Amino acid sequence: MNNKLYLNQAIQLAVENVSNNGGPFGAVIINKQGEIIGRGQNRVTDCNDPTAHAEIQAIRQACENLQTFQLDTCTLYTSCEPCPMCLGAIYWARLEKVYYAADQNLAAASGFDDAFIYDEIAKHHEARSIPFHLLPLKEKVLPFKVWDQHTAKVEY
């Protein structure tokens, strides 16, 4: 595979996206044959969707194109090191590899600093800037009981 070629395509998507009032992020996903099966650009502000990051958009498109929720034979190329949300999506999609160009420090220098999220993850729930509160309801186990007994479930 020509990693630099695919990474440059992700960078070009990012550059084009800025001209279209989007964020400076782009991503492509390729299959084992080297075909691009997913593309994404950061569309957070124009879609009013904080999850519309380039990597997420590319994952959604690749999954739709392949009709699967797992991309374990695919590679992601992204113009910048993925944020914590995208990192989670990458692991849930089970991508085989990730290549990125800019690191999180370069992104932070342009105002895209996600270090605070990494800091928040490490804190105890009640100490986070957005507090998380566990409510001990007896019904909390019901969804998992139903899942465990469901015979037609698709595990992931």
Image (cartoon, rainbow, N blue to C red):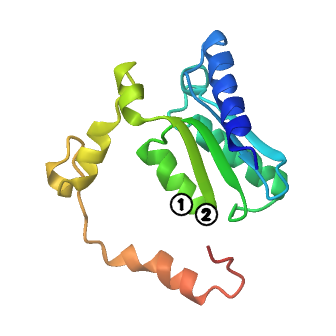
Q: Position of residue 126 (x, y in %)?
A: 16, 53
Identify residue type, mark 2. Answer: Arg
Q: Nearer the viewer, residue 109 or 23?
A: 109
Label 2 environment density (alpha carbons within 10 Å; few <14, some 14–19, many ≥20): some
What residue is shown at x 49% (from left), y 75% (from top)? 143
Assign the C terminus to one quadrant of the image: bottom right
Return the mark for residue 94.
2
Q: Nearer the viewer, residue 103 or 83?
A: 103
31 left or right of 57 in image: right
2 left or right of 133 in image: right
The answer to whether 125 is drawn above or below residue 7 in the figure is: below
Q: Position of residue 133 (x, y in %)?
A: 23, 57
Per the image, the residue denoted by label 1 is 91
What residue is shown at x 55% (from left), y 25% (from top)? 48
**Which quarter of the figure has residue 49?**
top right
Q: Nearer the viewer, residue 60 or 138?
A: 60
Q: Position of residue 60 (x, y in %)?
A: 69, 47
Tag 1 near tag 2, CB within 8 Å? yes
Mark 2 residue element: loop
The answer to whether 19 is drawn above or below residue 131 in the figure is: above
Mark 1 residue element: helix
Identify residue type, mark 1. Answer: Tyr
The answer to whether 19 is drawn above or below residue 142 in the figure is: above
**Which quarter of the figure has residue 74?**
bottom right
Report the number of numbered marks: 2
